[in-house]
Amino acid sequence: MLRSALLVIGIALTWIGLVLLLIRGTPFAQPFLIWGAIVVIAVLFERWRYRHIVHSKGGQWQPTGECFEDPETGQTIEVHYDPVSGERRYVEKHDNLPPQKK
């Protein structure tokens, strides 16, 4: 919901900037064009950068051996690959948990 609203606001600012560019010239249009573009790019980049981390291990997924630390949660994330579709997904690696007390 918030993502959609920000995208609409960014597109609206960009359109306002384009209209002002045609009517009044560059000095009036620049802030709208710049901030509209920043909002649109930021919203689209956020969706690409922060992917959903999958918690299940079912299916034909195979670990690739690639691991990294998720900066948001601090958990070790392992990359899995599906040879049929070529899709990659990111799974929490559970073997790095401390041993449980009995």
Image (spheres, rainbow, N blue to C red):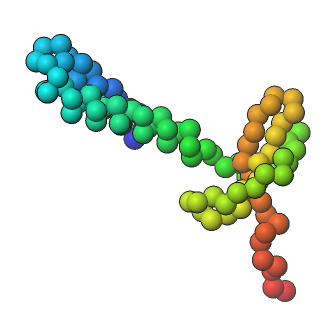
In the displayed structure image, the side of residue 41 where residue 36 appears, left or right: left
In percent of width and height, residue 45 lies at: 49, 38
Q: Residue at x 72, y 48 (%)?
A: 90
Relative vertical location of residue 17 with respect to residue 74 in this rendering, above or below: above
Nearest the camera: 26 or 17?
Answer: 26
Q: Position of residue 75 (x, y in %)?
A: 67, 63
Position of 52 with respect to 20 (left or right) is right
| In the image, residue 1 above or below residue 15 | below
- Quadrant of the rendering where the C terminus is positioned: bottom right
Does any portion of residue 88 appear in the rendered image? yes
Q: Residue at x 85, y 48 (%)?
A: 63
Residue 7 in percent (x, y) is at 38, 32
Quadrant housing the N terminus: top left
Q: Where is 15 relative to 81, above or below?
A: above
Horizontally, residue 6 falls left or right of residue 25, namely: right
Q: Which residue is situated farthest in the top direction here? A: 22
